[in-house]
Amino acid sequence: MADQNLLVMNGNEFTFEPGETILDVARRNSIDIPTLCHLKGTTPTGACRVCVVEVEGARTLLPACATPAGKNMVIQTESPKVVEARRTIIKLLLASGNHNCAARGSDEQDWTAFQLGVAEDDRSDQLCPVWGDCQLQDLAYRYQVTGEGLPGTVVNYPLEDVNPFIVRDFSRCILCGRCVQACNEVQVNKAISFGFRGSETKIIAAGDKPLKDSDCVFCGECVQVCPVGALVEKNVRYAVRPWETERVRTTCTYCGVGCQIHLHVRDNRVVKVTGVEDVAPNYGSLCVKGRFGYNFVGAPDRLTRPLVKKEGEFQEVEWNEALDFIAGKLTAIKEAHGPDSIGVLTSARISNEENYVAQKFARAVLKTNNVDHCARL
Amino acid sequence: MTNTIACVEKADVILITGSNTTENHPVISAGVKRAVSSGRTRLIVVDPRRIKIKEFADHYLRPNLGTDVAWINGMMHVIIAEDLHDKAFVAERTEGFEELKAMVAKYTPEYVEEISGIPAQQLVEAARLYAQAGVGSILYCMGITQHTCGTDNVKSLANLSMLCGNLGMPGGGVNPLRGQNNVQGACDMGGLPNVFTAYQPVNNEDASRKMGAAWGLDGLSTSIGMKATEMIPAAHDGRLKALYVIGENPLVSDPDLNHAEDCLGHLELMVVQDLFMTETARMADVVLPSRCFAEKDGTFSNTERRVQRVRRAVEAPGEAWDDWKILTELSDRLGYPMDYADSEAIFEEIRQVTPSYAGITYQRIDREGLHWPCLNEEHPGTPVLHSAQFTRGKGLFHAIEWQPPAEVTDQDYPLYLTTGRILYHYHTGTMTMRSKDLMERAPESFVEISPQDAATYGVADGDRISIASRRGQIDAQVKVSRKAVTGTVFIPFHYAQGAANKLTNAALDPVSGIPEYKVCAVKLMPGS
Ligand code: SF4
Ligand code: SF4
Ligand code: SF4
Ligand code: FES
């Protein structure tokens, strides 16, 4: 018993593996400790301190994400002291920029002026673009905090939207550093880092250049991990609300990695793509094609009707007519020249089921082994 | 891949060759970069271009185009000469070592330097690292296969991996990175002229009888069919009268496009099933609208043999049909009814006739895909191949000599051209070029040349230039880049305007039928 790795959390005993943090043990046992800056698989930075817990015998509250689990620790994850600390942190964060959702709250007379100011910065008269999909807002709600009574910090860095994919809104950045961890430690693109100091601190690409002129490859990992509305997909910003969309899990159609993705669908259109976290092979990561290359799905020039060429021009026909025409031609060619005068090119972009049917079509119906795909090309 | 994507991060040393990993398989490249940055893993990159991943490498070797067999033999020469090979693995698990040893004897680092241009000392150091660092993983892509000697290149990499006992080990293996998302599946499903599903040969009596029985037919053809690259010329000389094309665009992706277009013009019937009016569809007699991945159910098999679900998210536009539905409707009319309720029903039939997929069900892969071979419903799948033995029993070393590429430079065509992909586009661009956002990043074809070549030809970044080979001529924008090595230029093949494949050579690898996209001779004509 004495050698076992045991600790007590909220009155219950749990075992742990050496190397696990308090947060790891909590999550494994469905104890909810809130986090903002913590990013699984990367070095803990302890930047936000929202995850603090009370450990018996420790002089201060300790960040659960960065504190190794220790033998016989006695931990409280939601004690009055912990809650008080979290409320203060959340309050400060709410006051730190344009957090103009209802959660921000404000003193009566400032509210309208503040909203008008934000609306100008945002070039929109809506509330924050990630309203309803923001971890800071969730925490404010959970701990019933507003930014009231604190003067709002004014952020002077203008919004950056000079690339096709990502809008960087520094006025909503809480400097949690998750994007920096994601870019440097997960995707290892090393495009962004913390720049400047003190109250001037900003997430910058080398030389404080716009992303489009930096080493950024627009994988969008940073957007996916940003807990607030500081990094948003350009096509989604003020266009898509999270509760209006439905998520469908599928496999990326581009390269052979086969990343697992969620297609976010609204009104029969794919409006956003995210990586599926916690599952192989990509564990949430994607590349620019997988994340941003979905426009072809609903493109206006998709083929919608069968076409048969008549006197050099394509004409729309019914399926029956097209299929009868092909069947007649194939039968005649097969009779006149034998089955091996017909070839089928199947595809590395269609499903297994469709490839199976395609080769069966060649072999069982046409009676030829002339079937191949262009993957090697 | 013999191993998994996650395995890459368990390697002690990774050898990347002929793969521009950060642009073509970004998510795998992230794993490589993480492993290297953590200090656990060393990296060797061998590539004719100074690609991004090279910045993470301990050793970067730059071979002349088409000299892969030579440098691989050279590494094996060093490893054997310095007695660094895995003698136990070689003795227990392989055959043909003595022949290999005799053959590589002449590939001294100095001899290899003459052929490949890789300085002898660099080759020696890279060989030592690969042999001594523990478990080694080899990652390769089309830079290895798209050569007249592509099959030889692949076998040579397998030689190198076996020699160091790296096959069948977590973190090891020889790992081709598939460029298109279901290449693996198209091959597994028998979308090849010589095999049924799971690589059962069409000219094997038993396999043919078994498949005939499953399909309720006797007398399936046992003669091997034509490869894609053989069908095109066969159209020209009249042996092929009809071509049925599903979701492919050979009129951008094929080599020597001018000739390919001429060939297809001879067909009596061409049918194209696709999402868009592609370059190829325009030449067809009938064009049929099909559904894209977001509109259908099914499975894809990724590069690590993991079978994963595809799920319908949106309705297809207009009257677009599933590709399988079009084919079964047609087969009904041709007197062989195929009746499937849905894609799962097809998958159930696949399981019956495909031993390596027998244990996979839609339900089992609902959350996370399984790696084939997966022999029954209790089988956990096979992340690492060859761990106890090779498919044929012992692993066979192939003693392979280097041969020059089909076309080399000369006075008229003094520069080498190599082709490939870029980050922002996919294959022939049918899908990615419909994104104005991706187009904004990569709007048009370009020719990447070294600063020195730019000076020689008196061209600057952004100039337009003509490039010609013996087969054709295109215009493209000049992109001066330190990625290019003087004497070799690069053009991405995605674009129909300024199509690299108007220039490429249709010379084929005799075994795989893959054309030599990676090497041909060209000339630059500034100001024309
Ligand atoms: S998009 Fe990717 S590369 Fe660019 S900053 Fe974000 S994480 Fe880094
Ligand atoms: S941009 Fe988002 S992820 Fe990055 S530091 Fe700011 S709030 Fe955190
Ligand atoms: S998201 Fe990118 S890396 Fe992943 S499968 Fe798609 S194309 Fe490949
Ligand atoms: S989540 Fe632990 S310090 Fe931020």
Image (cartoon, coloured by chain):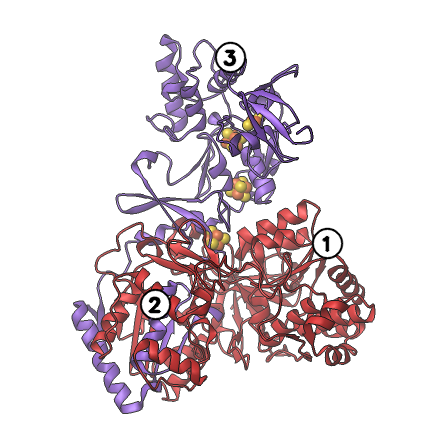
Tell me residue A182's x, y (percent).
Answer: 56, 39
Residue at 62% in and 34% down? A20
Chain letter of the residue beneath label 1 in the structure image: B
Say whether marks 1 and 2 touch (CB < 8 Å): no
Label 1 sits on a secondary structure element that is loop
Residue B475 vs A22, above or below: the answer is below
Labels 2, 3: front one: 2
Q: In the depicted view, which residue is nearer to us: B11 or B152?
A: B11
Residue A67 vs A333, above or below: the answer is above
Chain letter of the residue beneath label 2 in the structure image: B
**In the orientation shown, which residue stands out farthest toward the bottom?**
A336
Which mark, residue A80?
3
Residue that carries the numbered disc 2 in the rendered image: B349
Tell me residue B134's x, y (percent).
Answer: 73, 57
Tell me residue B152's x, y (percent).
Answer: 62, 76
Label 2 packing within 10 angstroms: few (<14), some (14-19), many (20+): some
Which colour is chain B painted?
red
Relative to A365, is B13 on the left or the right?
right
Label 2 sits on a secondary structure element that is helix
Q: In the depicted view, which residue is nearer to us: A272 or B260?
A: A272
Q: Callout 2, which amino acid?
A: Glu
Q: Are marks 1 and 3 on the same chain?
A: no
Tell me residue B354's x, y (percent).
Answer: 42, 70
Residue that carries the numbered disc 1 in the rendered image: B58
Label 3 sits on a secondary structure element that is helix
Label 1 packing within 10 angstroms: few (<14), some (14-19), many (20+): some
Picture quadrant of residue B193: bottom left
